[in-house]
Amino acid sequence: MENKGDCGGEPDEGETSQERLGLLLSQTQNCSAFPKASSAADVQIACAALASVSPDFGTDDMDARELVVGPGLIRVKGLRRDGRTGGGTRNNITGFSFAARRNMLRTLGVLDLSSVVGIPVVVTLTYPADWREWCPTGRDAKAQLLSFRRRWARRWGVFAGVWKLEFQPRRSQPKERQLAPHFHILAVVPALDPSQPIAQATSMVDVRAWVSHTWWEVVGSQCDDHFQAGTRVDDADGNTPGRVVAYFAGYTAGRSKEEQHIAPFNWPGLGRFWGVVGIGRIEVSVKMNDREFFAVRRLLNELMARRSGRRRRSLRRYDDGLWLTLDNAPELCSRIADWLDPPPRISPRPLP
């Protein structure tokens, strides 16, 4: 029988039985999972304010530069001088590259979390100690994740969420089993709705019990320790949408998670490290002329430096873009519109 510590997902020491019960699920139907998330209307209003800054806004080099705004993202884009925007043949995925991390963060910043209804939870799915027997390739692990998602949809009526693959260091195991795959999932449990024909969850106890049993069945390990400690379900903070980005980026771990992005040796079929299911996206683009492009880019660079406590990024190329993730991008977009009005000539006034 495997060691429980190798299965992962067990409650923290000192956690009381009352804490493990979790809060009761909301009795209110159609409750927003992220009540403070910006909506499509918020983004449209902020972009309209920006586009009305001056009569000539966006008339110079209209096809060259633009400002892209989402609920949690502001991005200035400038095309290369030859008009190319990238592309080409993609190689097989061998690790969580800087480009993959960047694309994940930018995607999370434009998710329409305001339309997600229910109770947000973070689900962790792990494997037993002899995990290579149950998921010998990355394709097997992704197939098991897909099976879990489909069972979730059948049980709770819908699956909407974000998933991410990481590798858990298990230094007490043999070398070939030291980096065990596991999944983190931000999912939404539907609020209690008596009109639905399917059985409803009345507390987090129901959700945790179902997740534990379902993942154990999907993996098929028949390991008692894996059944007891192979999963974890925690309440997610729906009041701070920015924490969704921070959690999946690893910023809230308290230590670097880079070692959890290293794939095991001889584990083919790795595939993608992350994905979004059942959540729409909001992106609104506003064309920019030279004056607005360089002014807004300089401002975002300064805000990034203040937030990180580091020096400002060196923007060497004429058309270098820049992007920033935050809790409420439309609010900052509206403030930028006020800051640019009247239009800047040499240097805009400081943003309050």
Image (tube, rainbow, N blue to C red):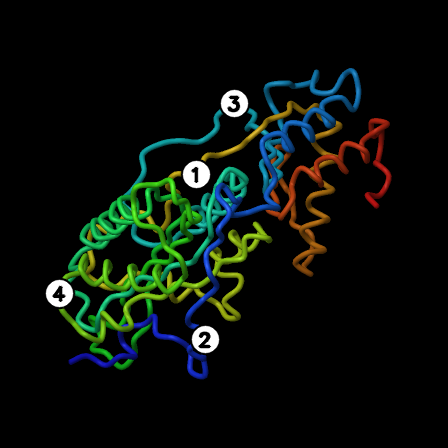
Q: Residue furthest front?
A: 194
Crowd around label 4: few <14 · some 14–19 · many ≥20 (10 Å):
few
Measured as percent of width and height from the top left, residue 318 is found at 64, 34
**Residue type indicated by callout 1:** Ile
Q: Secondary structure at mark 4?
A: helix
- In the image, is residue 331 above or below residue 50? below
Crowd around label 3: few <14 · some 14–19 · many ≥20 (10 Å):
few
Relative depth, front residue between 264 and 230: 230
Measured as percent of width and height from the top left, residue 150 is found at 25, 45
Q: Which residue is mark 1?
A: 279
Q: Which residue is mark 4?
A: 133
Q: Secondary structure at mark 2?
A: helix
> How far separated are the C-alphas under marks 1 and 2?
33 Å
Q: Are marks 2 and 4 in contact (CB under 8 Å)?
A: no
Q: Which is nearer the N-term, disc 2 or disc 4?
A: 2
- In the image, is residue 89 above or below residue 144? above
Judge left or right: residue 101 versus residue 93: right
Q: Which residue is mark 2?
A: 18
Measured as percent of width and height from the top left, residue 106 is found at 51, 42
